[in-house]
Image: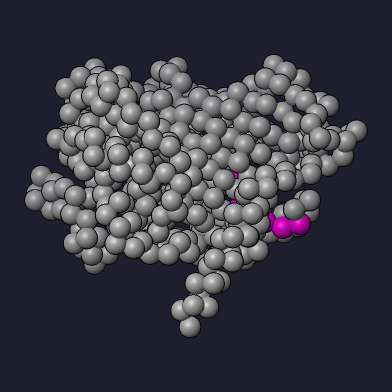
Amino acid sequence: MTKANEAQTVEKDTAGRITDEDIDRARAQIGIPQFERNDVFNKETSRDTISHFAFGIGDDNPLWHDPDYGRTTRWRGQIASPLYLTTTGVDETPRPDPEQKKLFRGLFSGVGKYYSGTDWTWFRPVRPGDVIYKEYSTADVEVKEQSSFSGGRTVIDRYRFFYVDRDGRPVAERIDSFINAERQGSKEKGKFSDLERTVYTPEEIARIDDDYAAEECRGAEPRYWEDVSVGDRVAPVVKGPFTVTDVVGFHIGWGFGQTYGAGPLRYAWAKRQRMPAFYSNDEYGVPQIVQRLHWDPRRAEEIGLPAPYDYGTMRTNWLAHMVTNWMGDDGWLLRLRNEIRAFNFVGDTTRCRGTVTDKRVEDGRCIVELEIAAVNQRDEVTAPGSATVLLPSREHGPVVLPEPRLELRRRGAEMMAEAAERRRGAR
């Protein structure tokens, strides 16, 4: 299991400490492709898994669901929503040798690990029947001795995921950031002790219902670059009030079991034999996966939180949902960056908002920059970010997909060639 997959949020216990030795080992891992022990959820993409993923994030754009609709677009068929790639990517990195095993053996034991942001760049669409390959490595390690996040020592580590097709052509690149935090610092601070669940009136639920009804999906009507002005507002998207059902729905499309190398019954038993720290006993003495703080109120309370909360990547998906709604079928989401600044607790309502901040033409491509944010019912910005969109133009023509930089094209070719060489040597 990769550390990044292990930690959309991991709460192992409240006594873990970040050691200098672990920091040194984390830094020594930078740039080294890491073996992915767990099977990827979707080894081959399909119309169903693409649709299931979009369902799990509450995105009903027909481009992600309906092949007949897709055939009427420039993509000539169904394509995947942007972050579907998190469910796929066959990893052909060889198993580590004994020295690498020592280097990669678990870090920051007993320490909470939180998804804190991401930076995606997309080069081409994903279609049913594609086989995507992935390479994963540590990109950066940053240490903060006294953090406002937890009150203790923290380490911010960033992981690079590189996706290519079976020809080695780059599909996307992503950098995920995680905060490793000494849990006892956060619990001692009691920063959430005064936060109470929102109680909604029927009128407030009616206003949320109105927001859902007003959601705008541009679809087949092109949004031309010439018609966009700096200061324009992006049509918002509402998500909430957030429930445990929403967590379950996300798991359906995202593939919780294989993403974490965990699962039900015998799968849970096998995982617990290999990684006992990934489980803790509940009040009945039953070993349960630490991820349960996303749906178990008692576990959340045990670590000083008022309620279960989302996976940070859910809000990244919601922001992408808003942007793809706005740009229409003929646009291309080139890049999306966001940070996770606060928890999104069960009961919270998130509104995704955006504003046009810049527009320009570069190398014949018509570019629009957006400032985006997820904002809760307390008017707190929980996930600020930005997006770069390519739009069609009356003057410059349809969107031309971006050309990956040479180092990515070369590495994609190397990945395919190296894997082929290993297979020949294994015969």
The image quarter containing residue 149 is top left
Where is residue 109 shown, x and y percent of the image?
Answer: 21, 43
Please name the residue shown 46% across and 46% down the image. Answer: 31
Left or right: where 245 falls relative to 274: right
The image quarter containing residue 121 is top right
Q: Is residue 277 above or below residue 272?
A: above
Left or right: where 211 falls relative to 197: right
Magenta-highlighted residues: 76-82
Q: Is residue 376 above or below residue 21?
A: above
Where is residue 374 shown, x and y percent of the image?
Answer: 50, 27
Viewer-closest of 70 and 183: 183
Left or right: where 225 falls relative to 245: right
Please name the residue shown 29% across and 62% down the image. Answer: 98
Please name the residue shown 59% across and 60% down the image. Answer: 414
**Main SS of the magenta segment?**
loop
Q: Quadrant of the N terminus?
A: bottom left
